[in-house]
Image (spheres, rainbow, N blue to C red):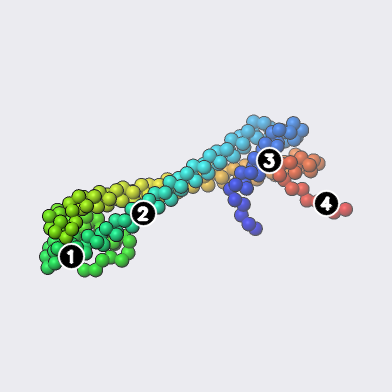
Amino acid sequence: MQKRTISAELAMAEIAIENALQNPDTLKKLSAYNYDRKRLLEGKSLKEEVQMLESVKQDKYGQQFSSTDSMKAQRKEIVQRYRQHSKRARLAFEGQRGTLEQLQLLGNRKMDTNGLMMQVYAFYSKIVLFAEEMSKYNISPEELAQSKAMVEALSAARQQQVQSKGQAQDATQKRNAKRKELNAWMMQFRKVARIALTDEPQMLETLGILVPTQKV
């Protein structure tokens, strides 16, 4: 059996609750089974809360996706700069193991993203101290300072992305909990409605409750 989407669940809940509230005869019969206007309005409020939480969840995931895309774009530009600057730094400090170690330029460049970015952060945190030597290889102090600022901005973007991810997950958990509550409310409502309106198949159908066709 295919699982209903949250949109379908909300639509079904709205049809059932609104039609029960707007039809006096239906409301009268349901009230006899403790589903009066007050209780139906409680169900409506629950449905609206699920809608609100679903909207919040979508907003949070939108923010997460935007943060992720922005971070990827920044990282791509920084890595391109790093490849150019690190090559020239290797030339500038060839044979100077101490300096190359400070700049994390000894050995091969890391291939995984996390390892590479650690090298990038280490490089730009120290390379500004060697601006005079790098200027001999056509890299100005301003360019190095700008690159360092870009790395710091990327770090902030990473923190924002992690925060957005956590907020999106939190919003999803809250939405899921309230969605479960609404589904339980609707399940009980349908059970009661089938009993209260057992002789009124048309009323049941206005609530979105299908009535099996009886064979003659």
Q: Nearer the viewer, mark 3 or mark 4?
A: 3
State the separation of the CA atoms marked 1 and 2: 26 Å
The answer to whether mark 2 and mark 3 are in CB contact below 8 A is no
The numbered mark, 4 or 1, whose residue comes first in the sequence reads 1
Q: Nearer the viewer, mark 3 or mark 1?
A: 1
Is 213 situated above or below 96?
A: above
Which quadrant of the figure has residue 13? top right
Residue carrying label 1: 90
Residue carrying label 4: 214
Q: Nearer the viewer, mark 2 or mark 3?
A: 2
The numbered mark, 3 or 4, whose residue comes first in the sequence reads 3
The numbered mark, 2 or 3, whose residue comes first in the sequence reads 3
Please rate how many residues cluster around mark 3, counting C-alpha atoms within 10 Å: few if below 14, some from 14 to 19, many from 20.
Answer: many
The numbered mark, 1 or 2, whose residue comes first in the sequence reads 2
Residue type pointed to by label 2: Ala
State the separation of the CA atoms marked 3 and 4: 23 Å
Q: Residue 65: percent from the left, percent from the top? A: 43, 50
Considering the numbered disc 4 on the image, is that residue within a helix, a strand or a loop?
A: loop
Nearer-the-camera pick, 199 or 87: 87
Residue type pointed to by label 3: Ala
Please rate how many residues cluster around mark 4, counting C-alpha atoms within 10 Å: few if below 14, some from 14 to 19, many from 20.
Answer: few
Q: Nearer the viewer, mark 4 or mark 1?
A: 1
Residue at 34%, 51% in the rendered image? 158
Q: Residue 69: percent from the left, percent from the top? A: 40, 52
State the separation of the CA atoms marked 2 and 4: 63 Å
Q: Nearer the viewer, mark 2 or mark 4?
A: 2
Quadrant placement of the N terminus: bottom right
The numbered mark, 2 or 4, whose residue comes first in the sequence reads 2
Residue 73 tag number: 2
